[in-house]
């Protein structure tokens, strides 16, 4: 399983940014084959985007699509970015 984590800075209203991102990003990631999970942490002017994917190819497809959306729809700027094979990832099963 592969992961993607990107840290951004932003200068937008937090609530507006969260609403815009949720509406724009979720349809993108759920449409990409191999999507497992997606989450966001917002703290002050920083946003951390974390996702999990079945394969490296899936993670890279997600990364490209998400970066394109961010550039076209927000003021967020990438501060750090990593996509790679999880050393380990524990997922609770219902």
Image: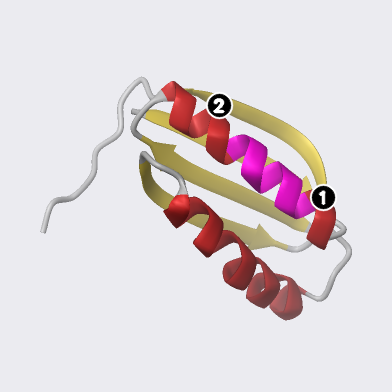
Mark 1 and mark 2 in contact? Answer it, CB < 8 Å: no
Where's residue 50, x and y in %? 52, 45
Where's residue 33, x and y in %? 39, 41
Marker disc for residue 41: none
| Residue hosting label 1 | 71
Mark 2 Cα within 10 Å, few/some/many (few <14, many 20+)?
Answer: some
- The residue at the point 33 percent across, 28 percent down is 1
Look at the picture and state if 31 lies above or below 4: below
Mark 1 Cα within 10 Å, few/some/many (few <14, many 20+)?
Answer: few
Is residue 64 found inside the magenta-colored segment of the image? yes
- The residue at the point 65 percent across, 66 percent down is 21
Q: Which of 36 and 8 is in front in this view?
A: 36
Residue 31 in view, yes or no: yes
Q: Which of 13 and 71 is in front in this view?
A: 71
Q: Seen from this angle, which residue lies furthest left? A: 94
Residue 76 in view, yes or no: no
């Amino acid at each position: 399983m592969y992961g993607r984590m990107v840290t951004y800075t932003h200068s937008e209203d937090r609530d507006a940014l969260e609403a815009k991102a949720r509406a724009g990003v979720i349809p993108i990631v759920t449409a990409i084959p191999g999507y497992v999970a997606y989450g966001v942490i917002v703290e002050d002017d920083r946003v951390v985007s974390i996702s999990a994917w079945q394969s490296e190819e899936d993670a890279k497809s997600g990364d490209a699509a998400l970066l394109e959306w961010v550039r076209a729809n927000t003021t967020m700027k990438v501060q750090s970015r990593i996509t790679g094979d999880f050393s380990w990832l524990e997922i609770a099963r219902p």
